[in-house]
Image (cartoon, helix red, strand yellow):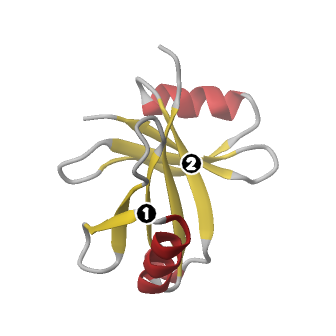
Amino acid sequence: MANPVVHFEVLGSDAETLKRFYGEAFSWQMQDVMEGSYYMVDTGAENGVAGGVGAAPGGAGGHVTFYVEVDDPTAALEKISSLGGRTVQEPMDVPNGPTIALFADPEGHVVGLVKRA
């Protein structure tokens, strides 16, 4: 399987401000999926990458993450660890959605993994 980038997130302290900023800056449509704390992004492009904007969990600092699709997040994390990366978040099932995980590369950049449901 190829491993395409399939999702991006822009998270920060104020989901509503981020929603308004990115929506107006790029004419993106936003769908509220978590009661005002997270919005799915429709960029309007046929072949663009889907994404989301929202509040960072637990008051964490703002960040941008992209997600790479994999067949097996656990196996991918093991391979990443063997290459000098580290697990940031073990695989977890999103309710009614995919399985996601996070890792940090050898320089600390956090990247997501996703296995579609």
Q: Which mark is residue 88?
A: none
Tag 2 residue: 66
Image-based side of 108 in relation to 38, left or right: right
Image-quadrant location for residue 35: bottom left
Q: Amino acid at mark 2?
A: Phe
User: Does residue 100 show up?
Assistant: yes
Q: Residue furthest left?
A: 96
Q: Residue furthest top?
A: 1
Q: Position of residue 49 (x, y in %)?
A: 48, 43
Q: Which mark is residue 28?
A: 1
> Residue at the location (42% across, 39% down)?
114
> Residue at the location (44% across, 76% down)?
19
Q: Amino acid at mark 1?
A: Trp
N-terminal-most mark, 1 or 2: 1
Who is closer to the viewer here, 58 or 56? 56
Q: Secondary structure at mark 2?
A: strand
User: Does residue 55 show up?
Assistant: no
Where 50 sits versus 2, above or below? below
Where 99 sits versus 72, above or below? below
Q: Secondary structure at mark 1?
A: loop
Depth-wise, is mark 1 or mark 2 nearer the camera? 1
Q: Position of residue 23 (x, y in %)?
A: 45, 71
